[in-house]
Image (cartoon, helix red, strand yellow):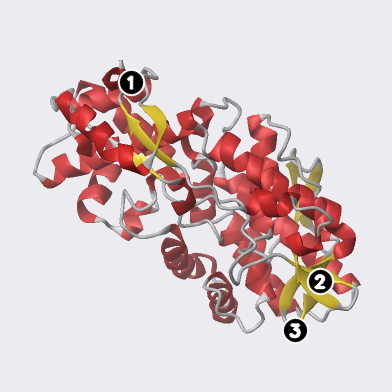
Amino acid sequence: MKKYKLLMDPVYDEFIMVERGGALEKILDSFYLQRLRYIRQLGPCYYVYPGAEHTRFQHSIGVMWLARKALNFLKLKDYPIDESLSTAILVAALTHDLGHSPFSHALEGIIIPQRHEELTLYALKSLSEETDLKRDLIDNVKKILSKEHPFPFSYQLISSQLDCDRLDYLRRDAFYTGVSFGKIDVNRILVSVLVEDGELIWSSKGFNALEAYVMSRYEMYWAVYFHKVNLSVQVLLKKIVERIKELLLEGNSLQMDHTLSEVLKEENVEKFFRLTDGNVISSIYSLMDSRDSILSDLCKRLVKRNFFRTVEVTPLEVLQYRELVEKAGFDPRFYFEVIEPSKVAYSYYSPSGMDIIKVKVEDRIEELSNVAPTDALKALSRKVSRTYVVLPEEVLS
């Protein structure tokens, strides 16, 4: 009889089961996955929503659990998935975020120049050595995460316009921020899962849940991920780290976390994986007393919640606001940022392009919004072009 480790997940109000002695438990207890306990899923969003303290560790387990449910539903529908492929998909779901930076997307590419997807593949190589996982398993996981696996559904379950990653973070982020519109019917969506010609599609019987998913994604996009205060804190964090890095590379000695200092100077990937949110926060508190006036000011702004202001502008006004920052005596490299939401990590659903939500209606396959009886989904999916500038509050007064 198999034995399982039980992990209670308040988001789904059920136990997540992990087989003892198996590949998933080995990864769960590994250095690389345990590190994610100390990296918040939504970066500095807790400055806006105090409950948003959940972590990449919780999210990773949730994605694995939803992937397991999807695979079980496919097996019940007699879709043939062998055990080795199932295991590879579950491992990919569990490890897909290993490469995230402290504060997640807020500092991605800032501490070291690689994207989190590249760093995840690096971590998988080291993880295989730490856990003695079979080489074939790790190779298949890499193919899934790189979207090179011969069966597209294997990676579409984890990374597509409708996948277990998005389903979990929308539901989890809504739960911990306290907003109501992200509470999507995950089980109704997953029971609608289908595979045809190796591609992931969804049954039209789950249309109402699918429609609610697109609507929830849109609302979460603007109310949580692109909340103006959240944007301003992300910019402030980024500017602090950029200033630290500049000073270190100029040869300055700073009273800060030693590991973070080494990684910023050397861009050492192995040491990067020793960094968590804590290394950054402890450095910021220490550097409030820095002799560098810019760094000291930026750190004090974060600690004392004197954030920058986020202002929506037209593209033609960007230069005007930058000039205001310069006239006020601020270095725009560290006190000015332009943000275009359509060009960053989180996004609302777009029905154009190759990566779309495919729905099976009787004997044909359609894009989701084409199945809808109204144009509501098309309206929500229409690209919204917005431009924000982020700058000190005092510049505007």
Residue situated furthest top in the rendering: 397
* Residue under pointer 3: 197
366 w.r.t. 43: above or below: below
| Disc on the earlier residue, 1 or 2 | 2
Q: Residue at x 71, y 40 (%)?
A: 182
Q: Quadrant of the N terminus?
A: bottom right
**What amino acid does circle 1 point to?**
Glu
Give the alpha-carbon distance from disc 3 to disc 2, as whole Å: 10 Å
| Residue 92, image x, y percentages | 60, 66
Mark 2 Cα-neighbour bin, 10 Å: few <14, some 14–19, many ≥20: many
Q: Quadrant of residue 106?
A: top left
Q: In which quarter of the view is residue 116 placed? A: bottom left
In the image, residue 321 sits, relative to residue 21, either above or below, namely above
Residue 85 % position (x, y): 69, 77
Please name the amino acid that badge 3 sits on: Asp
Residue tagged 2: 194
User: Where does label 1 land, which residue?
Assistant: 393
Question: Can residue 152 be seen in the rendering of this structure?
Answer: yes
Mark 1 is surrounded, within 10 Å at the Cα level, by few (under 14), some (14 to 19) or many (20 or more) other residues, namely: few
- Which mark lies nearer to you, 1 or 2? 1
Image x and y of residue 318, in percent: 30, 39
Q: Nearer the viewer, residue 294 or 386?
A: 386
> Quick check: marks 1 and 2 in contact, CB under 8 Å?
no
